[in-house]
Image (cartoon, rainbow, N blue to C red):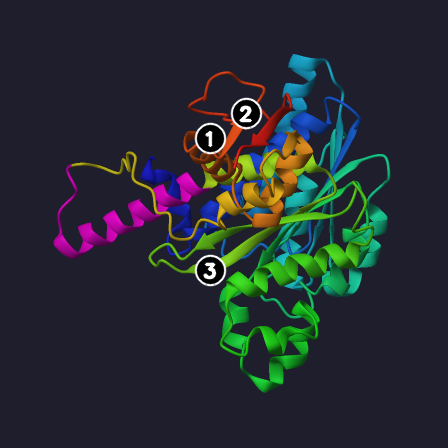
Amino acid sequence: MDRSKLESYSGREQASVKHHLLESYFKRLIMITAQGRYNRIAYVDAFAGPWQSSRDDLSDTSFARAVEVMESCRAELERVFRRSVSFRALFVERNPTSYARLQTFAQQRSTTQLQITAINEDFAESAESVAAWIRDEEMAFVLVDPTGWKDVVFPATLAPLLRKPNVEMLINFMWNFISLAAGHANQLKNLQSTFGDEYQSIVKDGAKSGLLMPTYLRRLRETAGRTNSRSRLRAAYFPVEFPNKKRVYYYLTYVTHHYKGMIVFLEESEKAFKYQDEVKFIVKQQRREVASGMTDIFGDDLGDQTDEKFRPMTDARSLWLEALPKAGAELLVDEEKIANMAEKGNCLISSLQDALRDLISDRTMQNLSSAKLRPKNVVDFKKGETIRRFV
């Protein structure tokens, strides 16, 4: 990675990881949905800011990066696919000073093809009107990226958006703040509004993300309703770490009503993990150079090194064994099935593929649709293949 890409993120490199995942996923969402059902795409930044921008043109902010993605996708859709797609964007900000800069940006960048509106409101009080702004005939992506967490990430606050089937969301769940709030009596009501009445029993031995994050995702699903429907809300998260620590700063929580959205998000998360490893490696290199006064002669190439500690994985092997509980059991693995398994275990699809490879290698299972064990794509879920359990 070229470390110059991180210059505008000095001291807040975690925001670079957030923007990387936001851009890569949002682009794929647009290019997939706008080639088919939707002729209109909407984008909402619920806490637009700007905050901590180091550039006069605000190009290092989430809303500016989203505008770049929309403009480039609109041009590509027209050039390559002859698709005329229109875009709308709504930027919400309650701080008057920040709003003034935001409004200027919106006025300067708004066009007939990309109409940008900025409003000076508090999203926690305006979620219902924001949901009403989104039209039924357009695909919408909503970024909820607050500087805090109280009120704004409560499932009840997000309910109007969670219940719209044409809305996907990326919620910045500020784990660092929430974990610090745990154990403080004056925060109990807020924590229960986030995790439910069972919060106290979950954290009796300490606040642990491995227990609290699945609880939060479940609460989001329940709030959306239709939990047994194919169009139910699906949820996953990506852990963004401190740039100089092996600790989670916040979780980017993703929700969608379509299993294909889950697959794409997990695919982009896989790439984002590699990007995050590279960012952390560069930050480490820079600190070492400052301390030694010497530039590392080997540069900033991470190579094949990766940090597995904070990958969101359960035992993927157990997911397969649960799906095929006894000898002779067979399972058709298609896109919806692999998405359901990954969501249930909060794991990457590659983890499921790796686990299945091991199960086939030790003759616990077999892919009836493939004569040979593939090095990659052990099960081709996009085509649909049948897995059988031997023992």
Mark 2, residue position? 367
Which is nearer the N-term, disc 3 or disc 2?
A: 3
367 left or right of 247 in image:
right
Mark 1, residue position? 360
Give the magenta part as a residue range. Answer: 273-297
The chief SS type of the magenta part is helix
Q: Amino acid at mark 1?
A: Ile
Give the answer, above or below, for where 58 lies relative to 373: below
Residue nearer the viewer, 273 or 137: 273
Q: Is residue 147 visible?
A: no
Q: Give the structural element (helix, strand or loop) at label 1.
A: helix
Q: Amino acid at mark 3?
A: Tyr
Which is nearer the N-term, disc 1 or disc 2?
A: 1
Question: Residue 249: which numbered mark, if any?
Answer: 3
Residue found at x 45% / y 46%: 16
Residue 170 forms part of the magenta stretch: no
